[in-house]
Image (tube, rainbow, N blue to C red):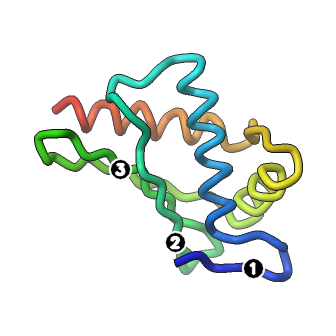
């Protein structure tokens, strides 16, 4: 279920969209070792952050997942950029890229 943040004018789905755009940019540059695209989940953390979970399920049924946090301010800015410019936010790219590398390592085990 998506949560809307009226003060910021964005939803948790748009935060996930910002993460997806950064992941798509990484895919264009580096490719993924898994055949597909990871699932992205966004949930609120109690410390003014969002917990982002990237997960991948293989055809053998093995599920790999990686979680990381984004500061609310950074996440809201990335979501607003996603809405207005439809481009990935360079402020979150390295974090997303590192999480994808970790997810690839998990899925290869």
Task: Using the image, tell me which numbered label, if any, was put on residue 55.
Answer: 3
Q: Is 108 on the left or on the right of 79, as rendered?
A: left
**Residue at 66% over, 60% down:** 15
Mark 1 surroundings: few (<14), some (14-19) or many (≥20) residues within 10 A: few
Instruction: Kindly state the secondary structure of the residue where label 1 is placed.
Output: strand
Please give left or right for residue 66 compared with residue 5 in the image: left
* Vertical comparison of 27 with 73: above or below: above
The answer for how far apart the CA atoms under marks 2 and 1 are is 13 Å
For residue 106, the mark is none
Secondary structure, mark 3, is strand
Q: Quadrant of residue 5?
A: bottom right
Q: Earlier in the sequence, mark 1 or mark 3?
A: 1
| Labels 2 & 1 near each other (Cβ < 8 A) | no
Q: Of residues 29 and 93, which is closer to you in this image?
A: 29
- Residue at mark 2: 43
As measured in the structure, the alpha-carbon distance from the residue carrying label 3 to the one carrying label 2 is 14 Å
For the C terminus, the quadrant is top left
- Counting from the top left corner in percent of width and height, residue 68 is at 48, 54
Q: Which x, y percent locates residue 48?
A: 65, 74
The residue sitting at 64% across, 38% down in the picture is 22
* Cα gap from disc 1 to disc 3, whole angstroms: 25 Å
Q: Nearer the viewer, residue 4 or 89?
A: 4
Vertical comparison of 73 with 95: above or below = below
Q: Is residue 101 left or right of residue 6?
A: left
Task: Indicate the position of residue 10 as horizontal and vertical percent values.
Answer: 77, 69
């Amino acid at each position: 279920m998506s949560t809307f943040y009226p003060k910021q004018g964005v939803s948790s789905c748009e935060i996930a969209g910002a993460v997806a755009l950064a992941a798509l940019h990484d895919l264009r540059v580096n490719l993924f070792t898994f055949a597909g695209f990871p699932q992205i989940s966004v949930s609120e953390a109690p410390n003014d952050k969002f917990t982002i979970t990237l997960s991948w399920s293989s055809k053998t049924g093995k599920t790999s997942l990686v979680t990381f946090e984004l500061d609310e301010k950074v996440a809201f800015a990335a979501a607003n950029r996603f809405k207005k410019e439809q481009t990935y936010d360079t402020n979150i790219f390295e974090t997303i890229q590192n999480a994808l590398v970790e997810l690839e390592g998990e899925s290869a085990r």
